[in-house]
Image (cartoon, coloured by chain):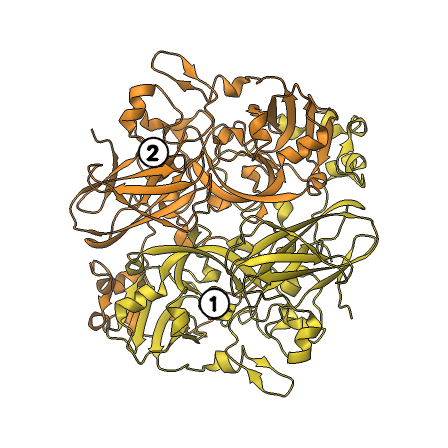
Chain colours: A yellow, B orange
Amino acid sequence: MTDEPTPSRRAFLAGTAAAGAGLVASAAAAQTADPLITEVQPWASAFGDPVDAAPYGMPISFESHVVRRNVEWLTESPVSSINFTPIHALEGTITPQGCAFERHHSGAIELSKTDYRLMINGLVDKPLVFTFEDLLRFPRHITTAFCECAANGGMEWGGAQLEGCQFTQGMIHNMEYTGVMLRDLLAEAGVQTAGKWVYVEGADASSNGRSIPLEKALDDVMVAFFANGEALRKEHGYPVRLVVPGWEGNMWVKWVRRIGVYDQAVESREETSKYTDMMPDGRARKWTWVMDAKSVITSPSPQAPIRHGAGPLVVTGLAWSGNGRITRVDVSTDGGATWTPARISGEARSKALTRFHYDMTWDGSEMFILSRAMDETGYVQPTKQALRDIRGLNNVYHNNSIQTWWVRADGEVENVEIA
Amino acid sequence: MTDEPTPSRRAFLAGTAAAGAGLVASAAAAQTADPLITEVQPWASAFGDPVDAAPYGMPISFESHVVRRNVEWLTESPVSSINFTPIHALEGTITPQGCAFERHHSGAIELSKTDYRLMINGLVDKPLVFTFEDLLRFPRHITTAFCECAANGGMEWGGAQLEGCQFTQGMIHNMEYTGVMLRDLLAEAGVQTAGKWVYVEGADASSNGRSIPLEKALDDVMVAFFANGEALRKEHGYPVRLVVPGWEGNMWVKWVRRIGVYDQAVESREETSKYTDMMPDGRARKWTWVMDAKSVITSPSPQAPIRHGAGPLVVTGLAWSGNGRITRVDVSTDGGATWTPARISGEARSKALTRFHYDMTWDGSEMFILSRAMDETGYVQPTKQALRDIRGLNNVYHNNSIQTWWVRADGEVENVEIA
């Protein structure tokens, strides 16, 4: 499964000079026949778009394959469903809002800032209702954090594999949020001594209510209204969503309308019938909120095969941990027999996506490539077998195991399991 | 000049509870009459958008005022012109590609990856032509950097003021780039001892040729193909642009097609007839590439007036320096008589936009608000008068002086100069 754009006719004509060179740079001699070098091209002899062409721009048409995608048969209805970030085609650490995965329980609602209200009630001295403008008057903070669905990679537990890095591991995104700290809003209301939990509801029909221990609520939970510099998009909770760094995505309540303070967890439908981990003995683990350290190679991967043949190859991937910073990522090209440290590129922020690169020379033969993340707590990303030994095969959530890609000699890549 | 969205009718009906409260949080008692609290709202009782609604999403309609804008009379043609980032409406540090300012000399061209070529020639051992795929095989790096037009704030030199923060200071953006280091490409070609400069050309009709000293080219200049996680947008140089951290935007050549190595600067049209600084004695300063430390309060500002009356007020702004990290930002609310340090929010990265916040209580009377940036070299952002004393009034470029906003008692804000 690939989703490369179709080459233009011009490219096809010029293709002899560029394709299959197998060298990092084609020798100058070979280029004398390349009309892209020797002839004046249309884009160099005519005006392009004016500055008023697109007040708000979209990606160029050549990138129309870099979109979030959903899988119809996964869920009964697309209003209570999921789509996937095209992580196989992205680089760096930021996920653009436009292609960042969505998970809704009753669809993405349209709620204006003027219609927006946030209530804080329960075990507080002074129940409060904030307008959107009220929130803008509290001290603002910035944090970059990954948001991963607890079910990311969940099909892998039982060995049912969705082909493609996007579909296997794409229920994740990473944005720079600006908002106010939940602790500042709670302080305004005055949490009573008996208050030990908050229960957070969204303004959508599902409400997606989730309980969060007060300790976390007072730590790094943010009531956010900007993502990647601009307002949250509709599908990401406009105008206000909760950001719960390091914890599973379903707790990042969108269109947040109420935060109640209670003496215990509410144990609502969303935190009992879902988002608990079925163990082999039939019992369910609950309150497994933290997303443990994980990594995945995003290219090469099933939707991003190797097209250039043997020689220099850049392996790129993402690593993250809900417990802090990524300190190291190892890559194996022999199915896990040997490991070599990859480069951490850019910043390794706490509870945020971290990019790694591994520069290698590919000999053109098949490889089983894997990555393994370590975080600042000393935790090491486990093998799939290690997780299954403890948690069995009937689980859906919290698969943070090592992902294996089989790179074939022809450069195509498949999602496989190795013994 | 404001560009707030028009409130919906529902908001108007509910407005009595929310508007003009003047308190951070309205008391619970006042909310009992608010239908947004007491009644089930339509968005809480119907499905929203399904997950296949927008494979690549756009901002919600309520944010349609947050767009880049151009000023028709500023230039003769919109294909050789500029537009402005809506910095008055953004937060955090990242600028989304879709609303990041554009400057073109002959329009934004459409150039596919398959049609793309990059030539390195001149004083090199081995002239080379790279395809796009060749570039993907070099080690990738990530850097976050601001790109500021040398003319940002240029109208202010002579006191001709464009109303609005967007138009006055919006020729700037800040993105996370991924690409390959120019030094790695130059090493592949082998720079000869006589080579002291590179000359960089774009594939557009203007070519926008610019000379860069070899020392900078071998330092932190990047040949970038991703911005904010995804492919560069067309208007930002798809598929490949130069990133020249800390240096003026016109050197960040888009659609880069050739990098020539020479023993001296080429002194092309773009670096002599433009982008030099006219001094009072009629001589022009040249090679003024670095963008010195600067800051601006983005809200409140002329397009972002205060609507909520006296009480808690969040002042938010941006600071940056082409010479390194921002170490401190001071804010004055009395026209520069006294200064108080603002909070640096999030990370203060070298040669990147840094967000500052200043939390204050506004007494409802008029203010002259200013910000002043300091960087790690010890440089302090100068007053406008200090710059004029040396550089006069006939300049266009490199106005990094302190910007003053006059906040009136009614909350409206104007761009003013103070003695």
Disc nearest the viewer among 1 and 2: 2
- x and y percent of residue B378 in the render? 37, 34
Looking at the image, is B170 positioned above or below residue A384? above
User: Is the same chain shared between marks 1 and 2?
Assistant: yes
Q: Is residue B102 left or right of residue A373?
A: left
Q: Amino acid at mark 2?
A: Val
Q: Amino acid at mark 1?
A: Gly
What quarter of the picture does the C terminus of chain A occupy?
A: bottom right
- x and y percent of residue A129 in the render? 28, 68
Determine which quarter of the picture holds residue A161: bottom right
Residue B48: which disc?
1
- x and y percent of residue B307 in the render? 24, 52
Q: Is residue A64 left or right of residue A302?
A: left
User: Dot 2 surroundings within 10 Å: few (below 14), some, or many (20 or more)?
Assistant: some
Whichever of labels 1 and 2 marks the residue nearer the N terminus, that label is 1
Q: Residue at x 71, y 32 (%)?
A: B188
The subunit letter for the residue under badge 1 reads B
Along the viewing direction, whichever of A373 and B296 lies nearer the viewer: A373
Q: Residue at x 53, y 76 (%)?
A: A288
- x and y percent of residue A300 in the render? 71, 53
User: Dot 1 surroundings within 10 Å: few (below 14), some, or many (20 or more)?
Assistant: many
Measure the C-alpha gap from mark 1 to mark 2. 51 Å
What quarter of the picture does the N terminus of chain A occupy?
A: bottom right
Asked if one can make out residue A368 in the rendered structure from this viewpoint, the answer is yes
Q: Residue at x 34, y 64 (%)?
A: A116
Determine which quarter of the picture holds residue A87: bottom right
Q: Residue at x 20, y 70 (%)?
A: B30
Element on which disc 1 rests: loop
Task: Identify residue for label 2.
Answer: B380
Element on which disc 2 rests: loop
Q: Is residue A10 left or right of residue B208?
A: right
The subunit letter for the residue under badge 2 reads B
